Amino acid sequence: MLALTSEKSGTLIGVFISVTTVPAAGFAALAAVAGHWTHCGEAVLQLLINLGGITAAGVLTLLVRRRRVLPETTRNARR
């Protein structure tokens, strides 16, 4: 998320999201096709935990950046 808010390439964000979501989603799909519903449920739970972590990290990053960046831009606008 820092790469996005600091105007760096969004590639790092895409890699992070892919690494945390694709394996869990893929395993859930394979387990469902094979009929292993317990494993499928565990993989879906892992996917939801990963998505929650991504969301929390993004929100926290944006809150921190807002507190540090906006006061400076507000000061410059008043001058």
Image (cartoon, rainbow, N blue to C red):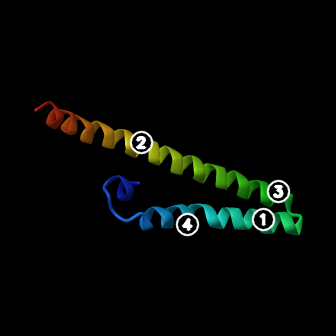
Sequence order check, earlier mark of 1 and 3: 1
Q: Choose mark 3 or mark 4, whichever is in front.
A: 4
How far is disc 4 from disc 2 in space, using C-alphas? 20 Å
User: For the residue labelled by badge 1, is the local secondary structure a helix, a strand or a loop?
Assistant: helix
The mark lying in front, picked from 1 and 3, is: 1
Please rate how many residues cluster around mark 1, counting C-alpha atoms within 10 Å: few if below 14, some from 14 to 19, many from 20.
some
Label 2 and label 1: CA atoms lie apart by 31 Å
Q: What element carries label 2?
A: helix
Whole-Å distance between the Cαs marked 3 and 4?
23 Å
Between 57 and 12, the one lying in front of the other is 12
- Residue 43's x, y, as percent? 72, 58
From the image, tell me which residue sits under label 2.
60
Counting residues from the N terminus, which is met first, the one under dot 2 or under dot 3?
A: 3
- Of the numbered discs 3 and 4, the one sitting upstream in the chain is 4
Residue that mark 1 sits on: 29
Distance from the alpha carbon under mark 1 to that under mark 4: 16 Å
Quarter in which the N terminus is drawn: bottom left
